[in-house]
Image (spheres, grey):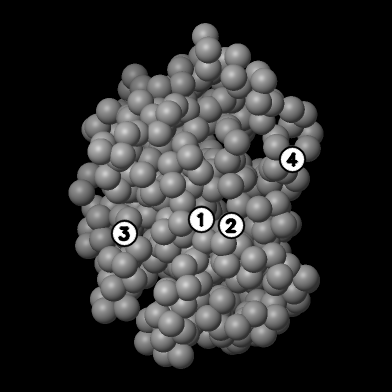
């Protein structure tokens, strides 16, 4: 059902020294990616409406008023190294919040027809989707796996790096993100907890997101995750911290720990959590989250939940591990035309933390079509 999975490429591993001033932390890392600036600008021109640019420029002119001091300084320093304007870096760091303006269902739908316009509502627009899995093996270890489906152009996928955030020469946590982006999309605190982010409500309304960001001075979900990854040492502390603090838009926070019962999906609104779904002590051995509340039925026009559950049940608890979960990640429709990268990791074993980047046209269209007809 897929073309050669040998085509996958490991994300580059880099070290970010938190002991350096924010203005110097990314210099050595970013200088290797200056060649990508034209592709970044072309992407923005396609998906960011011109009417938004003046608002973004306002944010850039007073960046320290809208982002945490360290993050603002990192962004300001990255821009010239990448050959971009500060406004471009701001756009990159808000792309999850604003990209949905120019994207319709046909751009991200994976498993069925788009909804009728009368039934679509806000679900007819939005950025790419995701699947995150927490699974407990027979010995009680929690494993974490995730796909991000965004249809990012191949040239921009090379920006994705696995970052070891270090202080005093010691790795505090590992976070994955594009170079130039100061939040993390997934990560792990060694011996503590793991995290991934899934979209909720497809990122929300762009104007509402911007107003909330500018007036409330809220963190984006990925910046919030990075902040908590640095400060929270345990799963319990992480769940509590991720369930509070104002964020720019709704999201799902998927959190794993080092104990058999430490696995949760936090359903976030802007102000706080509305639901924390945890793994039962016995019985079900996994949680699988896509982009819809687990208490609601998945829409027929994008149901990746049902086949995802079937693949996990076929794997069984005895098959849980890095290889087993990677196999689930690469089965249709969890793995689909829009999948940009896959990752597997565990807070109990960070030596195997790895993000894999996928080339374009990885899915075998003929096999997928045959499967969907069954």
Question: Do tag 2 and tag 1 residues touch (Cβ < 8 Å)?
Answer: yes
Q: In the image, which disc is placed on residue 8? A: 4
Toward the front, the furthest residue is: 117
Asked whether residue 163 appears in the rendered view, the answer is no
Helix, strand or loop status at disc 2: strand
Q: Identify the residue at horizontal 64%, vertical 66% (top origin).
A: 42
Q: For mark 2, what is the residue? A: 176
In percent of width and height, residue 356 lies at 68, 44
Which x, y percent locates residue 56?
44, 79
Image position of 172 (left or right of 245): right
**Is 176 positioned to the left or the right of 136 in the image?**
right
Residue under label 3, please give it: 205
Of badges 1 and 3, the one in the foreground is 3
Label located before the other in sequence (2 or 4): 4
- Alpha carbon separation for disc pair 2 and 3: 25 Å
x, y percent for residue 367: 65, 18
**Distance in Å between CA atoms under marks 4 and 1:** 19 Å
* Residue indicated by mark 1: 185
Mark 2: give few (<14), some (14-19) or many (20+) Cα within 10 Å: many
Give whichever of discs 4 and 1 has the lower sequence position.
Answer: 4
Q: Say few, some or many: other residues with alpha carbon within 10 Å of mark 3 (under 14 / 14 to 19 / 20 or more).
A: some
Helix, strand or loop at disc 1?
A: loop
User: Could you tell me residue 214's position as x and y percent?
Assistant: 32, 78
Q: Nearer the viewer, mark 2 or mark 4?
A: 4
Query: Local crowd at mark 4 within 10 Å, few (<14), some, or many (≥20)?
Result: some
Answer with the quarter of the image where residue 176 lies.
Answer: bottom right
């Amino acid at each position: 059902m897929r073309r050669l999975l040998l085509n996958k490429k490991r994300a580059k591993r880099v070290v970010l020294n938190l002991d350096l001033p924010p203005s110097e932390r990314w210099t050595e890392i970013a200088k290797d990616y200056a060649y990508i600036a034209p592709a970044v600008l072309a992407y923005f021109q396609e998906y960011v409406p011109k009417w938004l640019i003046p608002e973004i420029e306002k944010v850039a002119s007073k960046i320290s008023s809208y982002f945490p001091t360290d993050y603002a300084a990192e962004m300001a320093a990255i821009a010239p190294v990448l050959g971009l304007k500060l406004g471009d870096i701001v756009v990159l760091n808000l792309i999850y919040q604003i990209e949905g303006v120019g994207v319709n269902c046909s751009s991200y739908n994976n498993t069925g027809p788009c909804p009728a316009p009368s039934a679509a509502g806000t679900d007819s627009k939005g950025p790419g989707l995701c699947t995150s899995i927490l699974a407990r093996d027979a010995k009680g270890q929690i494993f974490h796996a995730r796909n991000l489906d965004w249809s990012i152009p191949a040239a921009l996928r090379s920006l994705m790096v696995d970052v070891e955030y270090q202080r005093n020469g010691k790795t505090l946590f590992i976070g994955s993100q594009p170079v130039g982006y100061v939040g993390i999309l997934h990560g792990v605190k060694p011996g503590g907890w793991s995290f991934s982010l899934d979209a909720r409500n497809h990122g929300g309304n762009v104007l509402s997101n911007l107003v909330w960001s500018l007036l409330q001075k809220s963190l984006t979900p990925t910046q919030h995750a990075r902040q908590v990854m640095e400060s929270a040492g345990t799963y319990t502390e992480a769940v509590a911290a991720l369930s509070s603090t104002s964020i720019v838009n709704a999201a799902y926070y998927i959190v794993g720990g080092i104990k058999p019962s430490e696995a949760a999906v936090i359903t976030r609104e802007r102000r706080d959590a509305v639901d924390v779904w945890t793994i039962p002590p016995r019985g079900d051995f996994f949680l699988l989250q896509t982009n819809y509340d687990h208490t609601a039925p998945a829409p027929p026009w994008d149901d990746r939940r049902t086949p995802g559950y079937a693949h996990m049940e076929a794997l069984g608890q005895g098959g849980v591990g890095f290889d087993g979960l990677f196999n689930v990640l690469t089965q249709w429709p969890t793995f689909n035309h829009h999948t940009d990268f896959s990752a597997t990791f565990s807070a109990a074993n960070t030596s195997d933390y790895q993000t894999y980047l996928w080339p374009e046209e990885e899915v075998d269209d003929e096999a997928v079509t045959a499967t969907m007809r069954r």
